[in-house]
Amino acid sequence: MSNISPEEKQTHISLWKESGLNKMKYCEQAKISYKAFIHWVRRYAPSLSPSRKRKTKKKSAFIPIALSEEKTEKRITHVIEIRYPNGIQLTCPIGVDISVLKSLLQ
């Protein structure tokens, strides 16, 4: 299999995509090395190969939380107010259930 041209490798990749088979089944049927085929896909069709880069967690910046008093009908209500850099503002009463707050933040 080492004497296969780049065009033949790309042909195998195209035939595999059209076959609907997984890579291993295609390699068995085409009688080619699975390890070599994986290399071909990474080299000639990188968009079809899963990224090897590890996903890194984004470092979360500190988001200041402002506590304010909101007067409604002569009643003072304490609220949590979160303002995102994109202008979105989230205001919830202090006693809001943590699961509700969590779902709003996601």
Image: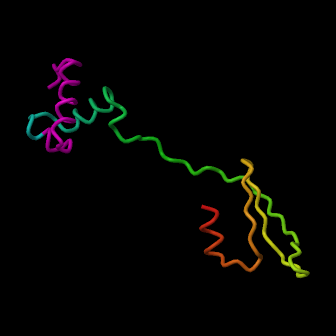
- The part of the image, by quadrant, that contains residue 83 is bottom right
At which x and y percent is residue 67? Answer: 84, 69
* Numbered range of the magenta stretch: 1-27
Q: Residue at x 79, y 65 (%)?
A: 81
Q: How is the image coloured?
A: rainbow
Where is the N terminus found, in terms of image quarters?
top left
Mainly helix, strand or loop, the magenta region? helix
- Give the residue displayed 76% in from the left and 75% down from the top: 93
Q: Quadrant of the C terminus?
A: bottom right
- Judge whether residue 9 is colored magenta: yes
Total numbered badges shown on the rendered structure:
0
Image coords of residue 34 (percent x, y): 19, 38
Task: Name the side, left or right, on which 2 lies relative to 105.
Answer: left
- Residue 30 in picture, x, y percent from top left: 9, 34
Quadrant of res 26? top left
Residue sitting farthest toward the right: 74
- State the image quarter where residue 74 is shown: bottom right
**Relative side of 19 to 40, left or right:** left
Tell which of 20 and 4 is nearer to you.
20
Q: Judge whether residue 87 is colored magenta.
A: no
Q: Looking at this view, is 79 or 9 the one in front? A: 79
Depth check, front residue: 67 or 54: 67
Across and down, in percent, residue 103 comes to 59, 67
Reply above or below: 37 against 24: above
Residue for point 62% across, 73% down: 100
